[in-house]
Amino acid sequence: MDAVLEIAGLRKTYRSRKGVRRALDGFDMVVGAGQVHGFLGPNGSGKTTTLRTLLGLIRPNGGRMALFGQEVPRRLPEVAGSVGAIVESPQFFGNFTARDTLSLLADAGGLKKERVTAVLELVGLRDRARERVRTYSLGMKQRLAVASALLKEPKLLILDEPANGLDPGGIREMRTLMRNLAESGMTVLLSSHILGEIQLICDQVTIISAGRRVAAGSVADVLARHSSSSVKVRLEPGVDLLGAAELLRGNGAEVTLRDDHFVVGNAGNPAQITRILAEKQIYVSELAPIAADLESVFLELTGTAPVEGQNRQVDQVSAPGGWGQ
Ligand SMILES: Nc1ncnc2c1ncn2[C@@H]1O[C@H](COP(=O)(O)OP(=O)(O)OP(=O)(O)O)[C@@H](O)[C@H]1O
């Protein structure tokens, strides 16, 4: 895999009168060419700090970063032309049209006028390009921001929370745009806390928590590696559900009762459930694994605060065992 972006052991500490805050604590990330890579983390986990550091807007306290194989920030001038980024909501003049705005930016960057038409087409603003920006919806303004980042034909596009504040229609449009860009061969790095979106759009994800990577890989791999070992258990009609649940709890199982079934949360070995129940002549009519989604994996991983001072990569730790193993 050709890495477009590599970060290893990145550290950033903010110092203020209120004290010292370790925003990045040995953070690692690799983004391969052609990926739509989701960068996920809860509020304050270090996403924006990572992106700003990568773009030379903040100086790190340690670690290594490279874009297209060139060490940054030292070699940033050589690779900056290949990177388009929106890390803060850009402000546009409300009285300008989208075409005026982009033409101005294209002139300032010494780019050809044709690029303006091309990017308007790409982000789906062609038909509204002669209207003033102040009449635009938030989604259209976001697309204009993406258009401005696309003017210089970047090979890597970095977007910090592009779907922030958008309604479902706007989010869907942004999703289509990301997919189209990826199909054109561009690598896209997308920070977000909208997990459903990341699951739909991205091939690969990196999850950050408290300034450290806690998971990385393809969405399918991350789900499989961290998938919950919960199973849904349904018993034959007329069987005492509560009694069966108590029996399993007595054997160390985490049981949650539902209306007509129960869920065993730490079922590393589901056969144990049927065995323990069958010994008491209680028979299972349904035993089904509960599929994990990115949201539950995210909550599980980021809810587990990494150990202070240790550069622990949770994704390198084998899956936790269940009570029945
Ligand atoms: N300029 C600053 N001075 C002091 N602390 C800061 C500064 N910028 C960020 N931080 C702190 O660093 C940590 C990481 O912040 P960062 O903005 O990178 O997180 P984030 O993942 O982008 O969060 P969000 O999703 O809320 O934007 C937070 O605890 C934040 O309060």
Image (spheres, rainbow, N blue to C red):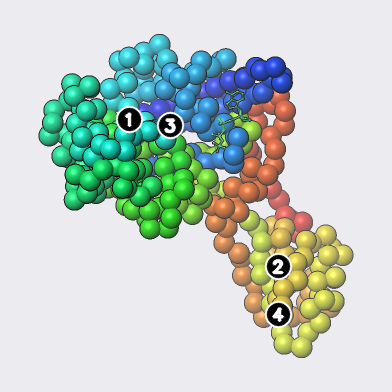
Can residue 217 be seen at all in this image of the molecule? Answer: no
**What residue is rendered at 38% in x and 53% in y?**
170
Residue at 46% from the left image edge and 41% from the top image edge:
161
- Judged left or right of residue 275, residue 317 is left
Q: How many marks?
A: 4
Dot 3, crowdedness within 10 Å: few (<14), some or many (≥20)? some
Separation of disc 4 and disc 2 at Cα? 11 Å
Quarter of the image with the C terminus is bottom right
Q: Determine contact: label 1, label 4, CB under 8 Å.
A: no
Q: Locate residue 81 relative to residue 31 in the image: left or right.
A: left
Residue 225 left/right relative to 159 = right
Q: Mark 1 points at which residue?
A: 84
- The image shows residue 248, relative to residue 201, as above or below, that is below
Q: Mark 4 points at which residue?
A: 260
Residue at position x 49%, y 54% from top? 196
Query: Which mark, residue 263?
Result: 2
> At numbered mark 3, what does the secondary structure look like: helix, strand or loop?
loop
- The yes-or-no answer for disc 4 within 8 Å of ligand 1 is no
Q: Where is residue 111 in the image (x, y as percent from the top left)?
A: 17, 25
Q: Looking at the image, is 255 positioned above or below residue 85? A: below
Label placed on residue 87: 3
Q: Which amino acid does label 2 sit on?
A: Val
